[in-house]
Image (cartoon, rainbow, N blue to C red):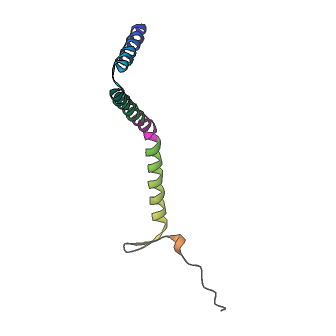
Amino acid sequence: MIEKVFAALVVAVCAVMLLRLALGPARQQRFDRFWLRLWQGLRARAIALWRWPRSRKAAQQLADDAIRRAREGRWEGNVYTPEQFKKPPKDKMH
């Protein structure tokens, strides 16, 4: 069964290549651009699908870190002041 699928795929590719040879130069360029754009679009979608879980996990980690930092700071009403913004005490000697 798989041999028939591969054979059909080879026949289809050969037919497309033969069709391309029958076209004129301008139509060959259009034909090539079409297949190139189709390939790039499919490739970009496949890469995005492959990377989706990793990027979603990274976004979740960033959100969790932001929430943790917000809880560590000081809130006065609706104004948030992070701990890292505390100024060191001024030198009283001068």
In which quadrant of the rendered image does the C terminus lie? bottom right
Q: In the image, is residue 16 part of the stretch drawn in magenta?
A: no
Residue at position x 46%, y 39% from top? 51
The secondary structure that dominates the magenta segment is helix
The answer to whether 30 is drawn above or below residue 63 in the figure is above
Question: Looking at the picture, how far across and down is residue 12, in whole percent?
Answer: 36, 15
The answer to whether 2 is drawn above or below residue 30 in the figure is above
What is the tally of numbered marks visible in this picture? Answer: 0
Question: Looking at the picture, how far across and down is residue 35, in whole percent?
Answer: 37, 29
- In front: 3, or 94? 3
Q: In the image, is residue 47 part of the stretch drawn in magenta?
A: yes
In which quadrant of the rendered image does the N terminus lie? top left
Q: Read off the magenta span.
A: 44-53
Residue at position x 40%, y 31% from top? 36
Residue at position x 48%, y 60% from top? 68
Outermost residue, bottom side: 94
Question: Looking at the picture, how far across and down is residue 58, in whole percent?
Answer: 47, 48
The answer to whether 8 is drawn above or below residue 29 in the figure is above
Outermost residue, right side: 93
- In front: 5, or 53? 5
* 86 displayed left or right of 23: right
Question: Looking at the picture, how far across and down is residue 20, in whole percent?
Answer: 36, 21
The answer to whether 6 is drawn above or below residue 46 in the figure is above
- In front: 3, or 53? 3
- In front: 19, or 14? 19
